[in-house]
Image (cartoon, grey):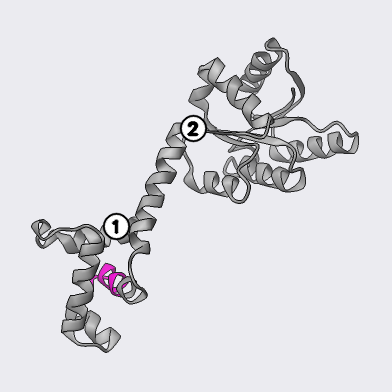
Amino acid sequence: MRVVIAEDSVLLREGLTRLLTDRGHDVVAGVGDAEALIKTVADLAAEGALPDVVVADVRMPPTHTDEGVRAAVRLRRDHPGIGVLVLSQYVEEQYATELLAGSTTGVGYLLKDRVADVREFLDAVVRVARGGTALDPEVVAQLLGRSRKQDVLAGLTPREREVLGLMAEGRTNSAVAKQLVVSDGAVEKHVSNIFMKLGLSPSDGDHRRVLAVLTYLKS
């Protein structure tokens, strides 16, 4: 397997290189920033020697924000045949979602702690290189959690979403009715439907309004 490693920490980059070469893989390049990663892969492509997989840190110079994942997204677009495995210090849902947008073949997102489990890490690299997917369990848990929240709100009608949005602004039922030019009774019916669809039972009492707003804000 031909591998390119993009990691600004020299110690971690050398460690990953050692892990892979000890298992018989060929680390054809190791770079410390996203710009060098893009250039290296482009040069290899020009030579007809694309790597099978790129292992890249999410955060790299110069700003240490999202350079790595942006480079990974670009590589997936420009060279669809390359597997891309990104490593992150902690789960960053926005980056994971961006990376997984579109095709999920040949892509992985792992927390750096997983590297400590050598077998698990090497299996992930090989799986991604072969067109599979390798997602950290923590990433899956958070993305599924967010999906569940979105699914709950998806059950609301456009008018109910509008009412809930005004509730989130701190409006009373009367204020919502005035804003929407409807009766107080109509708003009360919408609010009741919102509570029911969000699974907020009458036993939650007056806290149901707060819980509904929190669900809206978290989505």
Note whether residue 171 is visible.
no
Q: Main secondary structure of the magenta part?
A: helix
Which amino acid lies under the numbered mark 1 shown in the image of this protein? Thr
Residue 33 is situated, as x and y percent measured from the top left of the image, at 69, 36
In screen coordinates, is 143 left or right of 132?
Answer: left
Q: Nearer the viewer, residue 171 or 200?
A: 200
Q: Height in image: 30 above or below 70?
A: above
Note whether residue 96 is visible.
yes
In screen coordinates, is 180 left or right of 64?
Answer: left
Q: Which residue is mark 1?
A: 215
Q: Mark 2 or 1 closer to N-term?
A: 2
Residue 36 is situated, as x and y percent measured from the top left of the image, at 76, 36
Q: Height in image: 39 above or below 197?
A: above
Q: Nearer the viewer, residue 185 or 98?
A: 185
Residue 171 among those drawn in magenta: yes
Q: Height in image: 147 above or below 134?
A: below
Q: Which residue is mark 2?
A: 136
Give the quadrant of the N terminus. Answer: top right
- The number of callouts visible is 2
Taking the spot 21% from the left edge, 64% from the top edge, the residue there is: 195
Q: Residues within 10 Å of mark 2 (few under 14, many from 20)?
A: some
Q: Which residues are magenta?
A: 163-172
Q: Secondary structure at mark 2?
A: loop
Taking the spot 89% from the left edge, 38% from the top edge, the residue there is: 46
Residue 91 is situated, as x and y percent measured from the top left of the image, at 46, 38
Q: Nearer the viewer, residue 191 or 38?
A: 191
Residue 49 among those drawn in magenta: no
Residue 35 is situated, as x and y percent measured from the top left of the image, at 74, 41
Q: Residue 115 occupies which quadrant of the picture?
A: top right
Q: Mark 2 and mark 1 in contact? Answer it, CB < 8 Å.
A: no
Which amino acid lies under the numbered mark 2 shown in the image of this protein? Asp
